[in-house]
Image (cartoon, helix red, strand yellow):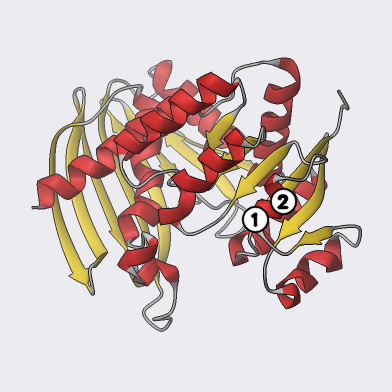
């Protein structure tokens, strides 16, 4: 088996064009080999940074390509489960954009298919591959801020001027919670190692999709609050407050795009310490970790079971709002 993993991308989505396709192209041990799109003109921007890229005119053609070992799925949310299953059935490893499914129960199907095929299938929850989150977990686990008592996450942006955006349409699996709720929800689960309890939620809807949500919950002895919106100014932050200090993460989800990865923490001595990671690309690291897991059999940092836990929280948030 070749050391380099040849990748194919299903669809010319803007996120794939701007982030993940370049990441696959740059990642060690990976080769961006094929793009599947029925619109040849959309391949142009991909060819600019990857001139050797081959283009198939259908998703089926890509899945039938014997030269492709791994597939990245950036399709609309409502299509994730179907095309992840079809890729696994075609003998391909799959990295699927988040959320990998619209309901937690659907992820059970993917887990079963993954286990049946022996292939790697995972959700592209990229923050777990960034060193700032390893550092945050270490600070919490070593009680650097005492006992954790509160977690807060904010992720907002405004796409109200783009009515055609798939996030603004129910039929494509749109909505703010499926799009960005995975970040603070998953981060709280990642850091605490716990599942949420006592969930309450207030949701504002437009045309069948959630555009603003305020969520309260508990993770063990720590309270939790999240504000999510597709109708507010662009902003993201997470904070962790303990009995003897606090942690503030100023670019928790899109470091390098939103701002520099920086963790500021203050402990009982009253001194604020700041650690930053000005370089590095969590998308590239994500691909490299995926390739490493394929080649070595090492556990992938974010399993489908982990994705299922976050989706279960999303399902419970919607239920609580009803």
Q: Element type at marker 2?
A: helix
| Residue at image mark 1 | 59
Q: Element type at marker 1?
A: helix
Could you tell me residue 120's position as x and y percent? 61, 27
**Residue 130, can we see it?**
no
Left or right: residue 210 versus residue 255 is left
Q: CA distance from mark 1 to mark 2?
A: 5 Å
Does 107 sit above or below residue 79? above
Residue shown at 22% from the left, 31% from the top: 196
Picture quadrant where residue 256 is located: bottom right
Residue shown at 39% from the left, 54% from the top: 180
Front residue of 141 and 99:
99
**Residue 43, can we see it?**
yes
Could you tell me residue 159's position as x and y percent? 41, 75
Q: Residue furthest bottom?
A: 161
Front residue of 247 and 94:
94
Could you tell me residue 187's position as x and y percent? 40, 37
Does 277 sit above or below residue 114? below
Q: Which circle marks residue 62 in the picture?
A: 2
Front residue of 83 and 170:
83
Residue shown at 84% from the left, 62% from the top: 49
Contact (CB < 8 A) between labels 1 and 2? yes
Q: Exactly how many numbered labels are in the figure? A: 2
Left or right: residue 288 versus residue 176 is right
Q: Quadrant of the N terminus?
A: top right
Could you tell me residue 61's position as x and y percent? 71, 53
Residue shown at 48% from the left, 40% from the top: 264
Front residue of 142 and 226:
226
How crowded pointer 2 is (Cα within 10 Å; few <14, some 14-19, many 20+) is rated as many
Picture quadrant where residue 77 is located: bottom left
């Amino acid at each position: 088996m070749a050391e380099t993993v040849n990748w194919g991308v299903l669809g010319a989505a803007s996120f794939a064009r701007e982030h993940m396709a370049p990441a696959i192209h740059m990642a060690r041990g990976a080769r961006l080999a094929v793009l599947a799109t029925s619109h040849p003109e959309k391949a142009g921007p991909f060819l600019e940074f990857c001139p050797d890229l081959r283009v198939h005119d259908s998703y089926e053609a890509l899945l039938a390509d014997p030269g492709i070992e791994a597939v990245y799925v950036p399709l609309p949310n409502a299509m994730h489960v179907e095309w992840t299953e079809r890729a696994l059935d075609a003998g391909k490893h799959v990295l699927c954009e988040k959320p990998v499914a619209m309901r937690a129960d659907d992820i059970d199907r993917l887990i079963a298919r993954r286990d049946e095929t022996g292939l790697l299938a995972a959700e592209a929850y990229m923050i777990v591959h960034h060193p700032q989150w390893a550092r945050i977990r270490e600070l919490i686990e070593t009680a650097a801020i005492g006992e954790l008592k509160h977690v807060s996450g904010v992720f907002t942006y405004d796409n109200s001027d783009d009515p055609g955006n798939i996030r603004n349409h129910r039929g494509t699996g749109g909505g703010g919670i499926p799009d960005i709720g995975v970040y603070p929800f998953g981060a709280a689960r990642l850091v605490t190692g716990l599942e949420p309890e006592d969930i309450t939620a207030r949701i504002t809807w437009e045309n069948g999709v959630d555009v603003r949500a305020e969520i309260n919950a508990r993770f063990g002895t720590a309270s939790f609050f999240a504000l999510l919106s597709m109708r507010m100014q662009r902003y993201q932050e997470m904070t962790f407050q303990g009995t003897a200090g606090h942690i503030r993460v100023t670019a928790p989800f899109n470091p390098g795009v939103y701002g520099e990865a920086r963790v500021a923490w203050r402990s009982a001595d009253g001194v604020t310490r700041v650690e930053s990671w000005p370089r590095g690309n969590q998308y590239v690291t994500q691909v490299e970790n995926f390739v490493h897991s394929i080649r070595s059999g090492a556990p992938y940092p974010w399993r489908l079971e982990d994705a299922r836990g976050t989706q279960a929280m999303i399902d419970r948030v919607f239920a609580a709002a009803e």
